Amino acid sequence: MASTSPWHEGDGPSAPDRIQPPAAPRSTRRPSLLRAPDPDGHAKVSFAELFFDLVFVFAVTQLSHRLIADMSWTGVGQTLFLMLAVWWVWIFTSWVTNWLDPERVPVRLCLFVFMLAGLVMSAALPRAFDDRALMFAGGYTAIQVGRSLFFAWAVRGAEPRLVRNVGRIGTWLGATAVLWLWGALDASLRLPLWGLALSLEYLGPSMGFAVPGLGRSSTADWQVSGGHLAERCALFVIIALGESLLVTGATFAEHPMSPAGVAAFGVSFAGSLAMWWLYFDTTHDLATGRIAHSQDPGRLARLGYTYLHLPIVAGIIVNAAGDEFVLAHPGGTTSTATALCVLGGVGLFVTGVGWFKWSVWGRWPWSHAVALLALAAAGAMSTTWSPTLTSAVACAVIAGLAAWERRMRARHPLTDLDAR
């Protein structure tokens, strides 16, 4: 007859802490912190998530101003590196809130703690490679490691496949945290250590966060609410566009009123509208529908949103720096820095949107290739143009592309595109 003792075999009354309590009634079990299954694949974006994003409004502003202040090769390279890091900490948090429910108090409190760490990280961005390296790395790793630890606690007892996935991600981020902090403390090794850390983090998803003993994740392990993740990334695009408008308004207010300045102001504003038009009118809705109804949403989310939204956001930030150059000096001839930011930023944005469409629909839109050729031709001639004219040409290219794409969408609905 099986023993009915409340202790494990070999234990005695001296180990009361090992008593196994009877199963709790369902109504008294610990509430799950996971999002409830969503039948239409589009979980709601919470106000807590939107509040969390406010920190990254500040981060994007810091990056834009950093780029404007130092257009040397070193400055551009460092700003690009920091942009990659800021995006990575944000997109990883968006993945976690795709799984966990921000309406639950523990998840919400965790987001608020990460907001504080993100504010510290963002404040350090202008001097992240100098005297505030530890401040930057500390804020960054606090979010990456802290989020992984909280995630592991939140999903304990959940589906084993999800628990293993969380363990793999946490192992990778824990290892890179050592490199981040080491690089912050040793200036002579900062560049190689931070470069290695960020490279490993970017390789992680594509390698399934492979860990000896835990195996590797497949995209089937990443069951996501596709509509939610699409909306989260769209909101980050809005953040970047908001920074562009902020730069336009603030710079215009600082300089004397002149016909050339007013023209530059109007063109810069029109350029932001054209970017919004291309992304939200011809891309976002169709992609959201595709990922929401995909049989493997994790694959689309990993490629299209985790990786390929980065050039979209980066292009907007670089173009915002170009807008400030144009508004500060609307007349004369276009400098190399201005041409690179204005035309290069738009080109980066167009390339990112084109790659994103390729990841969703499986084909590169040749209209984007035509737009890139037009921007390259403009770059060859821009040194003889005024900055305002260069900005106007970039605006015309992206507005023309958006109009072209809208016309193609009207002629060929999504079902037709799928068949082609």
Image (cartoon, rainbow, N blue to C red):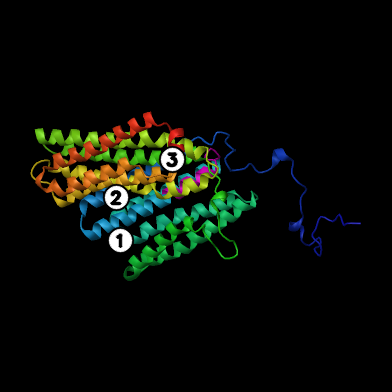
Under tag 1, what secondary structure? loop
- Residue sitting nearer the eye, 372 or 100: 372
Q: Quadrant of the N terminus?
A: bottom right
Q: Position of residue 60 (x, y in %)?
A: 32, 46
The local secondary structure at tag 3 comes to: helix
The tag earlier along the polypeptide, 3 or 2, is: 2
Image mark for residue 63: 2
Label 2 packing within 10 angstroms: few (<14), some (14-19), many (20+): many
Residue type (three-letter) at the residue carrying disc 3: Arg
Q: Do the numbered discs 1 and 3 sit on residues whose CB atoms are within 8 Å?
A: no
How busy is the neighbourhood of tag 3: few (under 14 within 10 Å), some, or many (20 plus)?
A: many
Residue that protrudes farthest toward the bottom in the picture: 188
Tell me where residue 27 sits by quadrant.
Answer: top right
Q: Which residue is mark 3?
A: 232
Task: Name the residue furthest left.
Answer: 332
The residue that label 1 is drawn on is 129
Q: Would you say residue 101 sits in the magenta stretch?
A: yes
Q: Amino acid at mark 1?
A: Phe
Instruction: From the image, state whether disc 1 or disc 3 is nearer to you.
Output: 3
Q: Residue at x 36, y 40 (%)?
A: 237
Q: Magenta residues, as a range?
A: 90-104
